[in-house]
Image: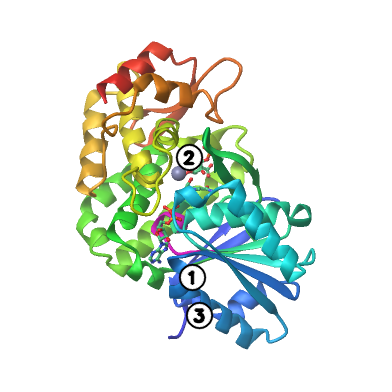
Amino acid sequence: MTPTAARVVHVGGQHPYHISIGDGLLDDGIALAARVRGRHALLVSDAHVAPLYARRVEVALHNARPDLRIERAVIPAGEQAKTLAHFGDVLGALAQLGATRDACVLALGGGVVGDLAGFAAACWMRGIDCIQLPTTLLAMVDSSVGGKTAVDLPEGKNLVGAFHPPRAVFADTTALATLPDRELRAGLAEVIKYGGICDAPFLDWLEAHAAALLTRDPAALTEAIARSCQHKADIVERDPFEHGDRALLNLGHTFGHAIEAEQGYSGVGNAALNHGEAVAVGMVLAARLSAHLGMAAAADTARIQALLEGFGLPTRIPAGLDPDLLLARMRLDKKANAHGLRFVLWEAPGAARVVSDVPEDAVLETLREG
Ligand SMILES: NC(=O)c1ccc[n+]([C@@H]2O[C@H](COP(=O)([O-])OP(=O)(O)OC[C@H]3O[C@@H](n4cnc5c(N)ncnc54)[C@H](O)[C@@H]3O)[C@@H](O)[C@H]2O)c1
Ligand SMILES: O=C(O)C(=O)C[C@@H](O)[C@H](O)[C@H](O)COP(=O)(O)O
Ligand SMILES: [Zn+2]
């Protein structure tokens, strides 16, 4: 296949890079090799993605750069693998490879691989290059961009991590052909998030293109990815370390992360919500909390709920989760500070803001409504 970079989004700032979005990019050894500086590369992937795509990337790179030594590290699939233990395994693989400071990590997979491999790259010898090769919709629209890297603890999501921007992002949209429907829908939750934060016309567009997106129409998917990446690029360029506006990208996440942790994280075959699903529920709860506080109209909650449900996403807290325990989880949210919890709430679709001093009884009431 002839690779075509259909779209390129530039991320500016102190460490600028490009996000390339198109067909066949995983086979474009020349473009990939152009971003690899040294003679060592560690390809990190998971047990689902490696058998599908790892060899293709290795062959493409080898053909372009026969001098490059490429090794592979494979972690189990799913959120339950985003742990310090597997992070340690990847560091061990870098040591085995003899990776020098100009070595490169290639993160081939969804957000779990991207976050964990990116964190290993951030830490190995205090920081080496990481090229993100996202294979889920969620990773293409969100996690591969912006340099947040992390692993989870049982106590909470992404509690150990670093900001480490990628050297480049190559989103090969043909990889979406093998993505399970459930994971496609999870990615659409983060796409909807951008509309909720700052782009009300994007919500209109998503309502109009729901069928095309769910049937994986390539033009609709490419448009959704490029528009999402452009929003994320604009925000992280302004505020790479989340001192301000970047927190808006957390819409739905204070609730969502609490649900994920309280369920013990999604794993292959368990019933826990995955990240995108938890964020979908969280966005509805954030909309409802905004209405409770008199910031937004109740009709706005109905609209986001209908849009998410139209994409087959959950919008209620899973049965059996205790509201008090969820609230306790939220106290470890990274937006919280000495003064208490902070939430991303909205005044209307497309007009979100970070709100401090949200009374805990209003949060609890929202959680109790489910
Ligand atoms: N760093 C950030 O800014 C950021 C942003 C959003 C989410 N995240 C993190 O991303 C993670 C969620 O990422 P995700 O939704 O991609 O989940 P994931 O990485 O667990 O991937 C979902 C599933 O799809 C499989 N898969 C991946 N690509 C595939 C393909 N092309 N074909 C077939 N199967 C494929 C995986 O093996 C896995 O089973 C969470 O840990 C979340 O916290 C990080
Ligand atoms: O890039 C960001 O900033 C985000 O908040 C994007 C989120 O979708 C993502 O899930 C992120 O990992 C959450 O970060 P955290 O700081 O709340 O752990
Ligand atoms: Zn997220």
Name the mark on residue 50: 1
Which of the marked residues, 1 or 2, is nearer the chain's N terminus? 1
Disc 3, disc 2: CB below 8 Å?
A: no
- Name the residue beneath numbered marker 3: 56
* Residue at disc 3, secondary structure: helix
Residue 10 lies left or right of residue 102; in this view the side is left
Q: Quadrant of ligand 3?
A: top left
Residue visible at 53% across and 57% down in the picture: 113
Q: Which residue is mark 2?
A: 249
At 57% from the left and 15% from the top, the residue drawn is 339
Marks 1 and 2, how far apart at CA = 29 Å
Indicate which disc residue 336 carries: none
User: Which kind of residue does numbered mark 3 sit on?
Assistant: Arg
Depth check: give the residue in front, 12 or 140: 140
Q: Which residues are magenta?
A: 133-139
Q: Using the rendered image of the protein, determine whether residue 251 is visible from the camera's viewpoint.
A: no
Q: Quadrant of the N terminus?
A: bottom left
- Against 346, residue 169 (above or below) is below
Asked whether residue 139 appears in the rendered view, the answer is yes
Using the numbered discs, state the Cα–Cα distance from disc 3 to disc 1 in whole angstroms: 10 Å
Position in image of residue 217 (x %, y %)? 27, 67
